[in-house]
Amino acid sequence: MNPALHFTMAPLGQDASATPATLSVVPVQFVIAGWTGRNAEAIEHHIQELAALGIARPSQVPLYYRAGAALLTTAPTIETLGLTASGEAEPLLLMAQGQWWLGLGSDHTDREVESYSVAVSKQMCAKPVAPTVWRWSEVQSHQDQLQLQSEIWEGGQWVIYQKGLLSAIRPLQSLRDGFWPAGQAAEGSVMLCGTLGAIPNAQGKGIRWAEKMRLTLHDPVLNRSISHTYAQQALDLVS
């Protein structure tokens, strides 16, 4: 059995003095939705961004990759081989207690492996997730206004790496239903729902390794945020 994930459930109108409710769920099926942009130009930008790293174009869009559910973790540090892995902020959908929840995760991926197999690369790294979720029913109607951002620790400071609205990503329920027809998702089903392009640094490099990454999903309508910071520890690559 996979390890359980433990989340704080952020209620509406939370009293600062109240004890937060918790949600524990054992992930049983993990799907990563790729090429999920609504804008064809934005999709092409991300395809070209990855092509610069030698990664082949997708066979179709969107595309659903399977990965081991045990890769999901709320730990503050993950271990990766060498200096070729990087993360990307993504909204996360989770089925638990008979309803859908919205969270935040990082599709941390080994880019060297991705250059010859995207599917294999998805299985190479742990997938950090924030330990807070919102009820999907509370945000679905204004999902396009949610703000997604990631920052990386670069040059001794936090640098904005990705930034944009969920309106740039296909409606999350359409991505969910594209893999699990209505009512067919089991308890513990998890989906990462796509990302935004990386903002290049001064040297023009977009996707890149970083020692630490900070993820944020902000809801300006309900005035609350989910955030998570994690580090990646590079293991020596020996042969």
Image: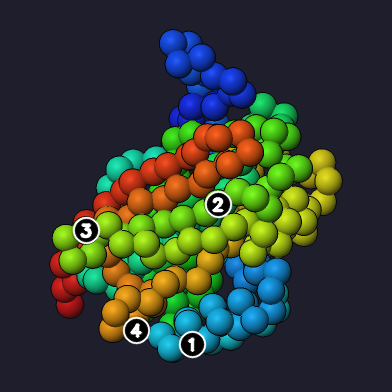
* Comes first in the chain, label 3 or label 1: 1
- Mark 1: few, some, or many residues within 10 Å (few <14, many ≥20)? few
- Whether residue 51 can be seen here: yes
Q: Give left or right: position of 226 versus 98.
A: left
Q: Which mark is residue 147?
A: 2
* Comes first in the chain, label 2 or label 4: 2
Q: Which mark is residue 51?
A: 1
Residue 91 appears at what percent x and percent y?
57, 51
* Comes first in the chain, label 4 or label 1: 1
Marks 4 and 1 sit apart, C-alpha to C-alpha, by: 15 Å
Marks 1 and 2 sit apart, C-alpha to C-alpha, by: 27 Å
Question: Do callouts 3 and 4 mark residues in contact (Cβ within 8 Å)?
Answer: no
Q: Give left or right: position of 6 versus 47.
A: left
Nearer the viewer's eye, disc 1 or disc 2?
Answer: 2
Q: Quadrant of residue 221?
A: top right
Q: Residue at x 48, y 11 (%)?
A: 18
**Which residue in the structure is indicated by mark 4?**
204
Residue kind at label 1, given as amino acid type: Ala
Marks 3 and 1 sit apart, C-alpha to C-alpha, by: 28 Å
Residue kind at label 2, given as amino acid type: Gln
Q: Which mark is residue 157?
A: 3
Viewer-nearest residue: 124 or 74? 74
Q: Residue at x 61, y 83 (%)?
A: 44
* Comes first in the chain, label 2 or label 3: 2
Nearer the viewer's eye, disc 3 or disc 1?
Answer: 3
Q: Residue at x 75, y 51 (%)?
A: 173
Q: In what element is the residue under mark 3?
A: strand
Residue 157 appears at what percent x and percent y?
21, 58
Q: In what element is the residue under mark 4?
A: loop
